[in-house]
Amino acid sequence: MFLRRNRRESLPKLTFNASEGRLSYLLNGRGFSNASFSLEVEGSALKPGDADKRLLYPSKILCDDIGVKRRFIARYVFTNPEVEWEVYLDRYVERPYTILGSKVRNRGNSEVRLGRCRLLDVEAEEGGGVILQGDLDRVTFFVETGTQRWSRVKRITSDDGEHVSQTIGHIYDPAAPICLNSSFVTFDKVKTEVAVRCDREKEISRLEAYCNFDGFTLKPGVSTRAERLLLDLREDPYASLEAWAEIVNRIYKPKIWERLPTGWVGWAWVDHFKDKPYEEIVMENVKAIEERLAGFGIEYIWVSIGNLWRDTPGFWLRVNRRRFPHGLRWLVEELKKRGLKLGLWCAPFWIPDKPPSLFEKMKDAILKKGGECVVYPYGWPYGYWSTFKKAERPIFYCLDPSHPKVKRWLRKVFRAYRRMGIRYFMVDFLISASGSTPGTYDYDEYYNKNLVKGPEVYRAGLEVIREESGPETYLLASTSPTLQNVGLVDGVRVGPDYGEGRPVIPVDSPYASFTRGDGAYKTYRPRNWERHKYTGCKMAASYFTHRRLYINDSCNLLTVDGDIPLNEAQISATLFGICGGPMMLGDNIPTIKPERLALIKKCLPRYPEIAKPVDLFTSVYPEDYPKTFNLAVKRPWGSWNILAIFNYDEPELNVEVGMESLGLNPEKEYLLYDFWDKRFLGNVKHRITVSVPPHSVKLLSVHELVSHPWVISTDMHITQGAVEILDLRWSKVEGTLSGVCERPEGEKGTLVIYMPDGYSIEGSRNIKPRSVEDNIVEAEIEFKERTVRWKLFTA
């Protein structure tokens, strides 16, 4: 028996009985006890106790990118079937986590089929137990879908007490408090899941974390690894998720872009397929961006679908000359003259059935299920195909990412695009080739059987796209697995299509549910608040992966013009302002109303940090959802909080937010300012009480009370100072407040300055102050140059 005891009671105790294959992990008596592990081979579960030989090795001290660790190794040898299974535990020194890993070797002369490798199996009927403290109805389980679909923190007793989460297993008991995190920290080879089940006696009857080889054939003499599983016990559920993401970051070392992509897509209010040539629409918007958004950092022009012959996915290198008469090379050069880059939409693993030429070329390189080609039954409705009946529109076959022909195809396409100068891609519908990674389109026949189907096969194709696109090209994965993209793409769409316009097309279109039928081209329909809620909830449920695994693309397109109500446009702008991700514009820039263009400017330039959901573990499924976000802003000259509270429903929402949940001292006083209502809310202590009208958002700045004049907000940016104020200083000796602000030349902006009792304005330089209410002065800045140095004299 190996026993690891910690010197500090604040760290978990690990007990590993290698001979029997039993494991306990407890913090102050909470966690799990008597867990087992097993490996399915040829349909039977092999357990350490069944091994014909057990080899136990002395522990040794090692060091890796995660930290210093003590490794325990046990090797189990079986004769029927002839396999050797090594299990190791890495107990990290002075850390609340342990990582389990596993290797399998086929010692025999025949192939063996592998199934589930359970690295953690806590089963009440087998003497195991998940040990918590409080009422199980208050305990939560984080259910990660691993795709753009809803991920939620759920009451563990909801949905009949049975849950399956992709990769992440996170149980939180607020009564203790204790958080048990059993999540995989590698997931590039085998499908990973964590399942939990509660029985009617309100007991967790089983918790299991496994990677599923799903029938993978291991050849004689060959070894393979399973994925690595994190065991983490601590009090803070947020810190638990963030620690998991930090560990994943250290393992995969993904490149994280410093500069967030910002660009234009359009598609709302103007029909890119019918109104006029797509090329003309693009160039009109390019000109308008130069005139109306100069200096705001717009970098990309993203063209979608209309560049393809007959608007048909699969014909990636055949240009639609009807829509782009001058071709894409000409467009790349025209954009380059203006400091812009061309981006494209692409579904790289799709091959259309109509016309049949591409299918005939690639038919032997398509994934199969039961001998039949795997089909993505879309019924493509756009552009050329919009007038066809659904049965006459193209559907798509799913390419096999492991096939040499597919790899050559991908190399040809993306190498040509790179040489052409394409520097941004949304690679879409990747789920068509992900199998059970997670995914929807499962398969059982593929080319390279040395790879495990699912993540390993999927990533084999994605690696080619990454290599040929080049490091200077931003890759955004969409309609795809999320976590399994780590290290191969730059951004991941973690939520739904949001803010996207669509032409009004027949009701059998998959997008008919969120387009309006009473106008030519609309982005939303009245009372369709589910999209806002969906987007906000997915942003909340994935906040911890942002800039750790990749850049979270939480919101997709910002579209605020047309007949979108102001309150809805403010919701969209706020989501973009606090999401920390890229921003593509969906509006028609030549015609957008000035007041709606101003909303876009309040989100530029992009601020790279994401807001944390304050109520992720308190506003939980099934009765509630997260709606309160805290963005802690830190600049060299000061720090403050941005608090956003969304109400997507009909009744007025009344919310209390404790200062502790914002990371603030509840015994101190703070100044509140309402950004959208342009109203000072006074001083608060202990907690913030907010009423949010139906279908609206409250956006507040929270500054610690000071005894001298200070800027507490601006009207220039959602973050209210994070990007537009470069420096801010108070001189007690001179009685002056001075600062440096930056906006594009020709812009105007307003600073909101708190003036404590006893101070008055004596003069100013480069700003125009005016008192608007007690203790509040608004000061207008005119940016005759990009950078303005200003000073306020007080007495």
Image (cartoon, grey):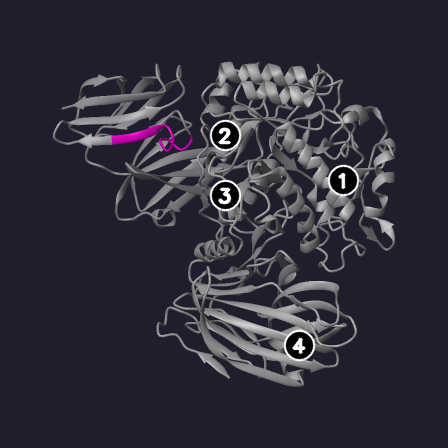
Residue 673: name its quadrant. top left
Residue 403 location (% of width, % of height): 77, 49
In depth, the one of 741 and 61 nearer the eye is 61
In depth, the one of 484 and 267 nearer the eye is 484
* Amino acid type assigned to the residue bearing label 2 in the image: Ala
Disc 3, SS: loop
In three-dimensional space, the C-alpha distance between marks 2 and 3, rounded to whole angstroms, equals: 24 Å
Residue tagged 3: 256
Give yes or no for contact between labels 4 and 3 (Cβ–Cβ under 8 Å): no
Residue 720 magenta? yes
Residue 782 location (% of width, % of height): 34, 16
Judge whether residue 518 can be spotted in this image: yes
Disc 2, SS: helix
Q: Residue most toward the bottom?
A: 52
Q: Main secondary structure of the magenta part?
A: loop
Ranked by sequence position, the earlier of labels 4 and 3 is 4
Residue tagged 1: 350
Disc 4 crowd rating (10 Å Cα; few below 14, some 14-19, many 20+) is many
Give yes or no for contact between labels 1 and 4 (Cβ–Cβ under 8 Å): no
